Image (spheres, rainbow, N blue to C red):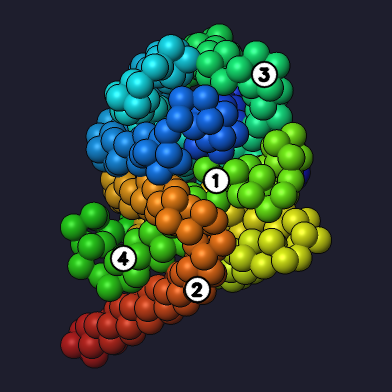
């Protein structure tokens, strides 16, 4: 994990526990709901005789229901009560996967998917982003967030082959049940030992004295949700995230199935999918470092552009098998930046006045896109018997998203400069009047 100079930073055991919890929320909460779904597609549809689009519709329900819960949890967790939300959703996810393990009809998957939708909003990027924003100063937030978010990559790298081996040896039903136990038997005990719903202290990377540990009572600066939605770049950010995640959400949920389509065995496909998720660890650390050392604009724009190469390589993979490793590398770098982009975009472009509310709105957009992307990719496969054309669409979409994010930062900078000019002019006029 990326190191932060401890000589310049005041830490407490509670800060470390919060970071550890955030890491495992991403490792199990995020990966155990979103990243791992691709390894179940082929065994479930082959066993029960469903088309891929009809089966993957449960993924659409997960993301659609998560949109509703994201708005609710964003407000609830911003006010406190984070621990209650976390534990409630850990139980909900276990019940959902237990239901999957006993499913005999599509409606069983669809019904339990609502519980997974709640779990995805309540156990992944939304609570992690709010906790890190609450506990860590802005000057180290990018790196701290990247450390926590590497959990999704490391968790996926371990969970995908592990659950894949369970499926091969004991069947997909046992795979779902074992996956649910991770939420019940590991995450709940970890959450219970961490104090979350208290007045928290931030860590500043620039000061090492007692004054650097201040309670969050200062007035937060930035835009309210009502003010933010009146800006043009607010909608550009939502559109950019929506478009690029149409590709990334589909890729995460169908990667193993696509590799099988390209001629790899089931074990090889699970291995490559695990490597992709493992590469996220490097990508997230790298993007967090770049966003802190330079600025979020450079980091997010650069890595979004790299992500477009991943989709291009996917499109070419059937004819160029050696592109599998460039796909893994560009996925890790590009998708790694997408995970940390929403919270950094909120803090950089809109401030902290209504951070939880604004992040909840962006999370809703992201989750809708994941749902639609997975469904569109499955429909594309049912129509063309291949995912290839979908990756070409995603290539152009990621390029458009990169341009929109660049324009959003440019518009914010222009607005900020104009505001500064107005303040200077007003101060000058007041001085002249006083004279």
Disc on the earlier residue, 2 or 4: 4
Query: Which residue appears at 25% of the width and 70% of the height?
Result: 231
Q: CA distance from mark 4 to mark 1?
A: 30 Å
- In the picture shown, does residue 179 fall above or below 433? above
Q: Closer to the camera, 208 or 352?
A: 352
Q: Which residue is mark 1?
A: 254
Q: Is residue 261 left or right of residue 51?
A: right
User: Is disc 3 in contact with disc 4, using a CB cutoff of under 8 Å?
Assistant: no
Query: Which residue appears at 68% of the width and 22% of the height?
Result: 168
Q: CA distance from mark 1 to mark 2?
A: 19 Å
Query: Given the current orientation, which residue lies at the most extreme front position?
Result: 49
- Dot 4: element: helix
Q: Which residue is mark 4?
A: 234
Q: Is residue 24 left or right of residue 169?
A: left
User: Badge 4: few (under 14), some or many (20 or more) residues near its Cα, within 10 Å?
Assistant: many
Q: Which residue is mark 3?
A: 166
Query: Which residue appears at 72% of the width and 49% of the height?
Result: 263
- Dot 3: element: helix
**Residue 233 image offset from top left, x and y in percent:** 33, 71
The quadrant of the rendering that contains the N terminus is top right
Q: Is residue 139 left or right of residue 48?
A: right
Disc nearest the viewer among 2 and 4? 2
- Residue 270 shows up from this direction: yes
Disc on the earlier residue, 1 or 2: 1
């Amino acid at each position: 994990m990326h190191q932060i100079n401890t000589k310049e930073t005041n830490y407490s055991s509670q800060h470390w526990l919060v970071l550890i919890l955030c890491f495992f929320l991403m490792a199990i909460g995020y990966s155990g709901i979103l990243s791992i779904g691709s390894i179940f597609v082929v065994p479930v549809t082959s066993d029960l005789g469903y088309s891929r689009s009809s089966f993957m519709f449960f993924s659409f329900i997960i993301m659609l229901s998560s949109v509703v819960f994201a708005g609710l949890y964003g407000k609830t967790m911003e006010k406190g009560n984070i621990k209650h939300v976390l534990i409630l959703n850990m139980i909900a996810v276990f019940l959902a996967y237990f239901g999957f393990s006993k499913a005999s009809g599509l409606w069983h998957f669809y019904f339990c998917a609502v519980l997974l939708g709640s779990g995805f909003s309540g156990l992944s990027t939304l609570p992690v982003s709010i906790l890190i924003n609450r506990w860590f100063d802005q000057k180290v937030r990018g790196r701290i967030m990247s450390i926590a978010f590497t959990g999704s990559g490391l968790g996926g790298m371990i969970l995908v082959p592990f659950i894949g081996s369970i499926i091969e040896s004991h069947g997909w039903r046992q795979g779902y049940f074992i996956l649910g136990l991770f939420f019940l038997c590991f995450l709940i005990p970890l959450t219970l030992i961490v104090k979350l719903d208290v007045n928290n202290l931030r860590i500043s990377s620039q000061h090492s004295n007692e004054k650097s540990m201040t309670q969050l009572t200062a007035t937060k600066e930035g835009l309210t949700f009502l003010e933010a939605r009146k800006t043009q770049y607010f909608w550009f950010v939502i559109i950019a995230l929506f478009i690029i995640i149409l590709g990334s959400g589909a890729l995460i949920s169908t990667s193993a199935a696509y590799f099988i389509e390209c001629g790899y065995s089931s074990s090889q496909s699970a291995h490559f999918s695990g490597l992709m998720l493992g590469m996220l660890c490097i990508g997230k650390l790298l993007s967090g470092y770049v966003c802190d050392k330079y600025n979020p604009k450079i980091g997010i724009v650069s890595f979004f552009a790299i992500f477009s190469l991943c989709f291009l390589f996917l499109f070419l993979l059937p004819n160029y098998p050696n592109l599998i490793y460039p796909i893994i590398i560009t996925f890790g770098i590009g998708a790694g930046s997408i995970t940390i982009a929403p919270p950094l975009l909120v803090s950089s472009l809109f401030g902290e006045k209504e951070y939880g509310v604004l992040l909840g709105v962006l999370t809703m957009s992201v989750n809708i896109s994941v749902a639609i992307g997975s469904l569109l990719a499955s429909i594309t496969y049912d129509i063309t018997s291949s995912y290839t054309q979908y990756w070409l669409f995603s290539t152009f979409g990621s390029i458009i998203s990169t341009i929109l994010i660049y324009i959003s930062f440019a518009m914010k900078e222009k607005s900020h400069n104009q505001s500064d000019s107005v303040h200077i002019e007003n101060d000058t006029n007041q001085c002249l009047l006083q004279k």
